[in-house]
Image (cartoon, rainbow, N blue to C red):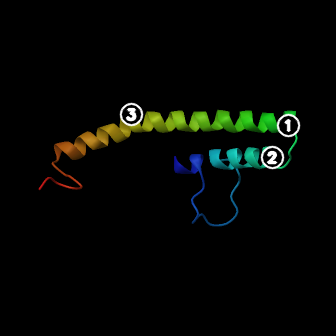
């Protein structure tokens, strides 16, 4: 799931720019490369980056609402606490 959002700094080798952060970064560089108004291609890059980011973040929301919430309940039921009360 993480690799859909971004590539960690310790990733090995050359990676394809298919993650959301790569798409957003590319779009920002394209728009920031000129003082002129964004071109239609720049705006298209921004729309694509936004669409991918929204999809990935929606999937993250779903993951946290289901699997992570279930895991947190199991941890609480087991009485495990990161910082137990004094």
Q: Quadrant of the C terminus?
A: bottom left
Asked which quadrant contains residue 31, the reply is: top right
Disc 1 versus disc 2: distance between alpha carbons? Answer: 11 Å
**Left or right: where 35 falls relative to 77:** right
Front: mark 3 or 2: 2
Asked which quadrant contains residue 24, the reply is: top right
As displayed, is residue 75 above or below residue 48? below
For label 1, the residue is 37
Residue at disc 2, secondary structure: helix
For label 3, the residue is 65
Residue beneath the point at 64% across and 44% down? 20
What's the mark number on residue 30? 2
Expressed as whole percent of the image width and height from the top left, the position of residue 85 reads: 14, 52
Expressed as whole percent of the image width and height from the top left, the position of residue 40 reads: 86, 33
Judging depth in this view, the residue of 8 and 43 nearest the camera is 43
As displayed, is residue 14 above or below residue 6? below
| Residues tagged 3 and 1 counted as in contact (Cβ below 8 A) | no
As displayed, is residue 19 above or below residue 70? below
């Amino acid at each position: 799931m993480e690799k859909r959002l971004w590539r960690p700094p310790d990733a090995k080798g050359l990676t394809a720019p298919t993650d959301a952060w790569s798409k957003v970064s590319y779009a920002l560089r394209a728009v920031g490369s000129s003082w002129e108004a964004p071109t239609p291609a720049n705006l298209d890059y921004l729309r694509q980056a936004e669409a991918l980011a929204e999809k990935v973040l929606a999937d993250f929301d779903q993951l946290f609402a289901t699997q992570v919430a279930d895991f947190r309940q199991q941890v609480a039921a087991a009485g495990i606490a990161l910082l137990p009360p004094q």
